[in-house]
Image: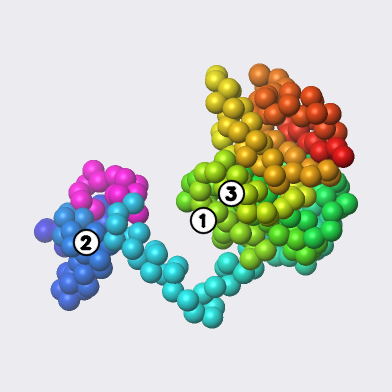
Amino acid sequence: MAETRTSIAKKTGRSTVTGASSAHVLAFLDRLTDGAGKALLTQINNQNADMEAIAREIASGTPVEELAKLARTGTVPDGIAWVTQANYDYVGLPPEAADCDFKSGFDTYLRERLGKRADGFATIFEALDQHETPFIIETGCLRVPRNWDGDGQSTFQFDWYAREKQGRVLTIDVNPQSIDSARRACSSVTSTILNDSVATLDALGASGMGPAALIYLDSFDLDLDNPMPSAIHHAMELMAARRLLAPGTILCIDDFDVAPLGPGGKGLIVDQFLNTIRAEVLYSGYQKVWRISA
């Protein structure tokens, strides 16, 4: 007995498109592929098609990028909420976290998620309590939401703290995808800058902005086999930020004491300089935290 289209579809796990609906499907696929809908449909219906690869190809195409920008850049009353309010769910926190003050939220929800960075961040926020309306500058922003143990979600933490203290946060990153993540996670207390961190820090200082209550340096990934490029970059950031420093400014470098390298990491050069000028060491572990002395 001849098999029907329906029975074939059930066996292959693929749906068939017939009649009037086919025109709508092709029109939809054309919109996603700049007119190549028929070719895409042929790919999809191939028994050996790699659906993940096809999906990635569509997602990285110009038509999808244009649609995403149209959807995100339209200004409507409800459409700007995601850049004015912090998104706790986006970073993997329960709804009730939004009702907590920062200290309670840190102790209840953040500390357990931060792993090796928990004590370092606790030290930072305790030291920040001495600053009114803190101005926080960060290089290398939150890039992967919910990646607490891997990255620390520092931008979200600073945003939460600054909202409560009537402060402000400025985060700098050269990667637009990271900037997008930080923008989606944080409230309008946080401003994002897509640019080279060294050039931006120098420009901020030259414009008279500052001094900063905290400068958190974490912009250049550490290569365990070749740590010097990252160490040099963070030393350049410190030099560029010189006009943003003042007595009492807190400075932190992430990925400081990392196995198997031991102490140094991203802060290898910065550590030697700050030791020379007798900056106060507040904490030394996976992160290192200093306070600029008077």
x and y, in percent, of residue 14 in the image: 26, 56
Looking at numbered disc 1 in the image, what kind of residue is underneath it? Asp
Residue that badge 3 annotates = 203
Looking at numbered disc 3 in the image, what kind of residue is underneath it? Ala
x and y, in percent, of residue 267 in the image: 68, 29
Looking at numbered disc 2 in the image, what kind of residue is underneath it? Asp
Q: Quadrant of residue 228?
A: top right
| Along the viewing direction, whichever of 237 and 150 lies nearer the viewer | 237
Residue that badge 1 annotates = 180
The Cα–Cα distance between marks 3 and 1, rounded to whole angstroms, is 22 Å
Q: Is residue 133 magenta?
A: no
Which portion, as a residue range, is magenta? Answer: 43-59
| Along the viewing direction, whichever of 19 and 106 lies nearer the viewer | 106
Query: What residue is at 51 percent from the left and 48 percent from the top?
Result: 195
Q: Nearer the viewer, mark 2 or mark 3?
A: 3
Residue that badge 2 annotates = 34
Q: Residues within 10 Å of mark 3 (few under 14, many from 20)?
A: some
Q: Assign a secondary structure to mark 3.
A: helix
